[in-house]
Image (tube, coloured by chain):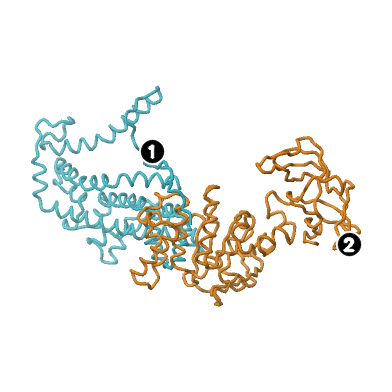
């Protein structure tokens, strides 16, 4: 079994604390993605799991065994790096075999294992090539192969797709997901790209400033963000955030527009931040949420993003790609109350 | 599973390209003509001593002090004399042995220390590096007396060990290797650490193959430096059997008359190994020095 447990994980560099008590349980075979902006502590957490950074405080358990004081090689993990870290002076075969150096397998078994991995990754014909004779995607596969060959309890991926172009990134994303479905190992994947996180993860861990903001399935973090940071970070374009008042079950916008929020909000009142995703905004004459002038259109084919200048600031909405409003046109937009997110203006935490 | 199309990266320009001469290059403007003329003059300046060395080695003693480049009566007698003198082979061997051992020692220790200073974080790391670098500022002439006293107290005078010990590890080599190891991404080292290699194995198996150009450059620098070393071997050796080639060659002739034609003959022969080494490794040495410059 390859559960991964993080308990009150703290990392300090001198007097500076960069991770402030991370708690997480990753189930056996689960694909967990750490996502967050630069400097949020996601890579540091991964490197601590790998044993490349010392743990200042807290406990890391892999497969029910505390690994805090174990060397990286003793943790039964394998890691794929952002820069591939495949050795340029070795052939593909030797690079993959490198992962088996400290294994006690016999040579025929090792060869068999290398062939199996090469077959899974579609690299059988490339085994004798040197890394400089491979494309970016092939190099990344070699790096994955070197990790796979050891059949570790936990795979660690540190932004492995960042160096690939957009098309290849999409392709490799799919391949890694298929690979996970096939081999079923526990995977911890770090990325700053929320699209990668949404498309690959069983669960997403969203981090900011060394704290976990929310842990949940892609659906949960998208549809039920725990705070304004998660709401803004997940989803592209970002969720619109509007200052509003909540009073007697109605949302009152600064420009005087108001609409009912439904029974669940009746007990609350006060200053709120109202979150609404661009795809939830629709043209509406009655119970409109906002009104303003279209300033920019961004056609995306099936739909067009429109930027609307409102008294509360600029908001973005998705319009039908075939018949979008013109630039300069006045629009009134509203949303289904069920699709609105209400956050406490002071704390940023979700109210409803 | 879908497979990515097999598209190798575009060949990127390498440092080799910087030194690859074009098929035909003609000066296009006055500035270029002046640059070429200066280079030509510099080339002549470099080649002349070598030309005179070869010229003198082909002259009879009476003609040695004539400045003419082409000998009036060329002779190979000097070569025959030097090659028939058994001491020449002994000095050649001494030089070869000392240069080879010193080179291997430098490749090992300089790269090990350079790697340690580059890739390990420990208190006082910068201080150690600065201390090593600062020794570059001390001229050899200042060091020979302490070296001599050390050799004397250890009983190393007039021995191979005495000749070799000051050069077994050099600050320059350490600096060169540290700069090159900076270009080895930490990811390689961490990947190897996860793959179960110990630190020495990582240095030897992963880091060293990635700095081969620097190793080749260092090998040539150290070999040439020791092959041509004169002052310290002259001071530390007493018996002619322990002489290195440069010291031995300088002993040709007597107090009244220096046999320049024999010295130049020996010098001409002694350039052959260095030429061979240089021709083999020149590709690396150029790349090595260029890369060191970029990193520095």
Residue drawn at (32%, 57%), measured in percent from left and top?
B167
Please state if A86 lies on the left or on the right of B67 as rendered. right
Q: For mark 1, give the secondary structure.
A: helix
Instruction: Name the residue nearer the viewer: B282 or A105.
Output: A105
In percent of width and height, residue B61 lies at 11, 37
Relative depth, front residue between B28 and A233? A233
- The chain that appears orange in the image is A
Task: Tell me the subunit letter for badge 1.
Answer: B
- Residue situated in front as seen by the camera: A195 or A344: A195
Which chain letter goes with mark 2? Answer: A
Q: Is residue A185 above or below residue B292?
A: below
Q: Give the alpha-carbon distance from disc 1 to disc 2, as whole Å.
A: 75 Å
Q: Is residue A54 above or below residue B223?
A: below
Residue A65 in view (yes/no): yes
As drawn, the residue found furthest toward the right would be A248
Q: Which mark is residue B18?
A: 1
* Residue count near mark 1 (Cα–Cα under 10 Å), binned few <14, some 14–19, many ≥20: few
Residue under label 2, please give it: A266
- Give the letter of the cyan chain: B
The answer to which quarter of the image holds residue A331 is top right
For the point 29% across and 66% down, the residue is B153
> Left of A70 or right of it: where is A222?
right
| Discs 1, 2: same chain | no
Q: Determine the residue positioned at 43% across, 57% down.
A: A122
């Amino acid at each position: 079994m390859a559960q991964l447990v993080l308990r009150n994980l703290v990392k300090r560099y001198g007097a500076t604390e960069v991770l402030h008590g991370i708690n997480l349980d990753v189930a056996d075979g689960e694909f967990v993605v750490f996502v967050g902006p630069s400097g949020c502590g996601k890579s540091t957490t991964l490197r601590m799991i790998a044993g490349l950074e010392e743990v200042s405080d807290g406990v890391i358990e892999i497969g029910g065994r505390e690994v805090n004081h174990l060397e990286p090689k003793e943790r039964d993990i394998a890691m794929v790096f952002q820069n591939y870290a495949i050795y340029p002076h070795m052939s593909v075969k030797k690079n993959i075999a490198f992962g088996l150096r400290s294994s006690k397998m016999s040579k025929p078994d090792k060869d068999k294992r290398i062939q199996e991995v090469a077959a899974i990754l579609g690299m059988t014909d490339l085994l004798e090539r040197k890394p400089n004779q491979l494309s970016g995607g092939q190099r990344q596969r070699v790096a994955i192969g070197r990790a796979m060959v050891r059949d570790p309890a936990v795979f660690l991926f540190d932004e492995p797709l960042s160096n690939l172009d957009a098309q290849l990134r999409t392709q490799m994303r799919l391949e890694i997901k298929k690979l996970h479905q096939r081999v079923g190992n526990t995977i911890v994947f770090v990325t700053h790209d929320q699209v990668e996180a949404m498309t690959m993860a069983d669960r997403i861990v969203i981090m900011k400033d060394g704290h976990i903001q929310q842990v949940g399935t892609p659906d949960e973090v998208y549809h039920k963000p725990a705070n304004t940071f998660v709401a803004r970070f997940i989803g592209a374009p970002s969720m619109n955030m509007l200052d509003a008042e909540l009073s007697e079950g109605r949302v009152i916008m600064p420009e005087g527009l108001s609409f009912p929020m439904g029974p669940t909000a009746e007990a609350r009142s006060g200053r709120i931040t109202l979150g609404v995703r661009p795809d939830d905004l629709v043209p509406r004459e009655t119970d409109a949420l906002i009104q303003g002038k279209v300033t920019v259109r961004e056609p995306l084919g099936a739909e067009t993003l429109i930027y609307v200048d409102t008294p509360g600031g600029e908001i973005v909405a998705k319009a039908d790609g075939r018949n979008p409003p013109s630039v300069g046109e006045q629009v009134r937009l509203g949303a289904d109350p069920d699709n609105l997110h209400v956050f406490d203006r002071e704390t940023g935490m979700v109210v409803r | 599973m879908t497979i990515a199309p097999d598209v190798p990266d575009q060949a990127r320009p390498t440092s080799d390209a910087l030194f690859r001469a074009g098929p035909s290059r003609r000066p296009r403007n006055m500035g270029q003509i002046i640059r070429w003329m200066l280079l030509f003059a510099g080339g002549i300046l470099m080649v002349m001593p070598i030309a005179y060395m070869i010229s003198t080695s082909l002259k009879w003693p009476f003609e040695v002090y004539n400045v003419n480049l082409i000998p009036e009566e060329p002779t190979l007698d000097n070569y025959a004399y030097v090659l028939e003198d058994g001491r020449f082979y002994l000095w050649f061997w001494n030089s070869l042995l000392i240069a080879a051992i010193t080179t291997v020692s430098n490749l090992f220790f300089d790269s090990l220390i350079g790697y340690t200073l580059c890739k390990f974080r420990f208190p006082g790391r910068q201080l150690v590096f600065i201390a090593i670098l600062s020794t570059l500022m001390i001229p050899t002439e200042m060091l020979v007396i302490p070296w001599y006293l050390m050799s004397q107290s250890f009983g190393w005078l007039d021995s191979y060990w005495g000749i070799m010990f000051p050069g077994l590890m050099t600050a320059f080599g350490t600096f060169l290797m540290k700069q090159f190891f900076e270009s080895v991404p930490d990811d390689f080292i961490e990947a190897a650490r996860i793959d179960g290699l110990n630190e020495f194995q990582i240095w030897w198996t992963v880091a060293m193959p990635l700095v081969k150009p620097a190793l080749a450059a260092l090998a040539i620098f150290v070999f040439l430096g020791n092959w041509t070393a004169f002052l310290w071997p002259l001071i530390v050796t007493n018996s002619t059997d322990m002489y290195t080639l440069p010291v031995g060659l300088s002993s040709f002739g007597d107090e009244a008359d220096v046999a320049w034609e024999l010295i130049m003959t020996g010098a001409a022969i002694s350039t052959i190994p260095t030429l061979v080494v240089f021709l083999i490794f020149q590709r690396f040495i150029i790349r090595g020095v260029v890369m060191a410059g970029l990193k520095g």
